Amino acid sequence: MSTNPTPYRHFWQPGVNYKEICTGWAYPPKDYDKWAELIYQWVKHCIDRYGKKEVESWYWELWNEADGYYLMVEDKFRVYCKMYDYAADAVKRALPSARMGGPHVTGGAGEFMRKFIIHCLQEKNEATGKIGAPLDFLAFHAKGWPTFTDNRVRMGIANQLKDVNRHLKVISSFPEMKNIPVIIGESDPEGCAACGMKTDPQNAYRNGTMYSSYTAASLTRIMDLNDSYGTNIIGAVNWSFEFENQPWFYGFRDLATNGVDKPVLNVFRMLGMMRGNRVAVTGDLAYDASSIIAAGVRGERTDVNALASGDKQSAAVLLWNYHDDDITEGAAEVDLAIKNIRFKKGTLYHYRIDQQHSNSYEVWKKMGSPQSPTPEQYKILEKSGQLELLSAPEKVSISNGTFARKVRLPRQAVSLVLLKAS
């Protein structure tokens, strides 16, 4: 059905220009009615196979980054809108309750996002002839920009937050979009998951604690931007994969290497242990989102900040010490105070990701960086990839609803201080 079907399959490899990936699949259909019928039958097939209730929970999208390389036409926006009209109509005919949205554009495509919303609200639908198109959610991508400078990695968290800020500003400018679900379909420190350190040395950050602290710092600032615009982000996808039969710690954007968990996975484990509602955090060592967008986290000062949550039975604080430069020297002394705790006695759990804890990469390097670990080494590596306690669980008393503790937080480290009622 492609307007340029040969060659259809690509043979792109890391280090090759991304345009080489755009073969026949990256062209629009030559017959929109046949293409819509294919989509209709596909949705019906999914309902038959997985059931209506399951398919109703899915988010149906049309295309990936149509504003960039991946739609090989001159007038990308108009072609995308026509494709969207036919696709959305086909999906809704097969399942009227299905959730259809887009446009899953790149972070820089704020104008594409604005025009897409206008199309769905006000313009003629190419498939139905009526005004408007179904729109159940909005989606875009947001990427950072690491570089390799002075023999070390320098992250570009400012770039990722600029992408988020750009799209949320556009979405919030439409009153009709006030409560629409928003999904960051790819939310990552850079763009190429399959590009390892050999072709892209800046991607070495993926193996160690830099990825962990970046993830904590960026996710929290995304939530801050969402709050400031009054938008409705319901999820952000960490676009990570499993790469089979590849060298150990090669620098792919994955959460584990050869079955051994990387430090970044433990940040998600920490986040998964937080319960209740988000609660306010104040401090004098943190950057706010606007200052990071303006200049990143550079210079003398690191970003020491926290994400906190609580309910009747627990209180949790995720702490990090982040800087764009991949340097581990320079710990922060944090005076942590948790207030308005609802129980009087509890158990304290302090989990940590740093050079000595929850860090399979450092253990692997100390082994001599083996590419064929022995069974005994593999067991050690597997264990070192799990989330570790900094110290043994501790029974504590809560005085006047407040718990205080001094925390020494190494640079690029992440801590989870968790209090559970007992």
Image (cartoon, rainbow, N blue to C red):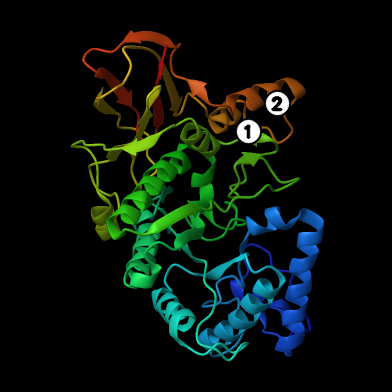
Q: Determine whether, in the image, residue 107 is placed left or right of residue 382.
A: left
Give the number of marks. 2
Looking at the image, residue 14 lies above or below residue 292:
below
Q: Assign a secondary structure to mark 1.
A: loop
Q: Nearer the viewer, residue 387 or 93?
A: 93
Q: Determine whether, in the image, residue 126 is placed left or right of residue 221.
A: right
Q: Assign a secondary structure to mark 2.
A: helix
Residue at numbered disc 2: 378
Q: Are marks 1 and 2 in contact (CB under 8 Å)?
A: no
The quarter of the rendered structure image containing the N terminus is bottom right
Looking at the image, residue 159 lies above or below residue 375:
below
Three-letter code, disc 1? Ser
Report if residue 177 is visible in the image.
yes
- The residue sitting at the left extreme is 284
Seen at 64% across and 50% down, the residue is 241
Q: Position of residue 158 (x, y in %)?
A: 34, 57
Residue at numbered disc 1: 369
Three-letter code, disc 2? Tyr
Report if residue 319 is visible in the image.
no
Q: Position of residue 390 (x, y in %)?
A: 44, 18
Q: Position of residue 150 (x, y in %)?
A: 38, 51
Q: Determine whether, in the image, residue 194 is placed left or right of residue 406.
A: right
Q: Nearer the viewer, mark 1 or mark 2?
A: 2
Seen at 33% across and 43% down, the residue is 323
